[in-house]
Image (tube, rainbow, N blue to C red):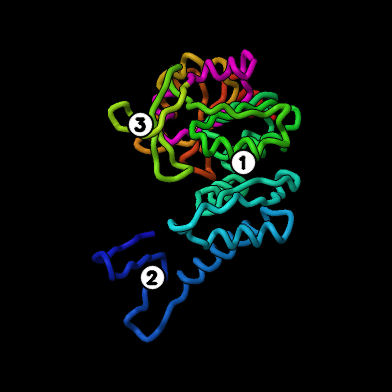
Amino acid sequence: MRCAREGRLGSRTTIEYPNYSYRNRRPTSGVQDYSLNFHTLISRTRRAFQQMAMFSDGRSCLRYMRMRVRRPSPNRAPLPALQLKVRAINGQRVFCRPGTTDFSVLYETFCGRYHLPPADLKIRTILDLGSNIGLTIAHYASLYPEARVLGIEMDPGNAEVCRSNIAPYAGRCEVLVAAAWKEDGEISYGGDTEWGFRITPESGGGSCRARAFSVSSLIDQLGTSCVDFVKMDIEGAEREVLADAGKWSGRVRCLKVEVHPPYTVAACVRDLECAGMRCEVQQNHFGCVLAWQPEVWSALRCR
């Protein structure tokens, strides 16, 4: 396939395949080719069906669709969180705040499902680094009813919603208001969206402060010597955390990392392999790296 771009704003983009081509704007000839519009329509239709299938009742689906298109008004008080019944967690209710990125997190969690461990891995303990509003914790708790889950979320506003979303699993799930970092201490962070808070350098002027814990300390707080699965989605801090992965990698059986620029997938794989883990890039999300201890790798590959 060859793509040829002509100019910038207002120009046409031609995508040429063997034996045919089409344009993403009206051609100068009298014949209109609707191929691109058709594919876009199919993609949007599929996404809409995925969104509707997330919910166990029509009311939740309607609420979700309405709030996806509503824009927050700076002159109005924030709207109360909406309660939505989600099919993937057996119809349990979750809370999402209107006018925030919570609804995007909901879609990515229950339709994308990039946070899930390998299906054949036996799970008893999970460390969820970057829990946001707790939807991934709730999903883990539903899928692994005997597992204990510790979530880490550094923003108090997100953590408050997280506590509400994991309340049905309070006996074995909890959230710690802190950041995952290369060492114990305190960090500054900032960001302009609820799902995009990032740790900032001390000189970067982050407007908020939070406690920070190393992965080893968090495993200790989970009350185990070795954790079965770690999900790491910490908005760029993974570069610093994985640079010292050799200090704790022996205590993690399986790890999934979502990589954020400027850190790269290749650098992530290199750091994890230097820590003694086997890695592969996920095919359904090319920004995700899955890593195992060698003995876990061998056991899963033999099944």
Q: Earlier in the sequence, mark 2 or mark 1?
A: 2
Using the rendered image of the protein, determine whether residue 280 is visible from the camera's viewpoint: no
Front tag of 2 and 1: 1
Residue at 71%, 27% in the rendered image:
172
Give the magenta-colored segment's residue range. 213-242
Q: Nearer the viewer, residue 217 or 32?
A: 217
Using the rendered image of the protein, determine whether residue 155 is visible from the camera's viewpoint: yes
Residue under pointer 1: 135
Q: What is the three-letter code of the residue carrying label 1?
A: Leu
Residue under pointer 3: 200
Q: On the image, which quarter does residue 48 sit in?
A: bottom right
Circle 2 sits in a helix, a strand or a loop, which is it?
loop
Q: Are marks 2 and 1 in contact (CB under 8 Å)?
A: no
Q: What is the three-letter code of the residue carrying label 2?
A: Asn
Q: Which image quadrant: the N terminus?
A: bottom left
Side (left or right) of 303 relative to 65: right
Q: What is the three-letter code of the residue carrying label 3?
A: Thr
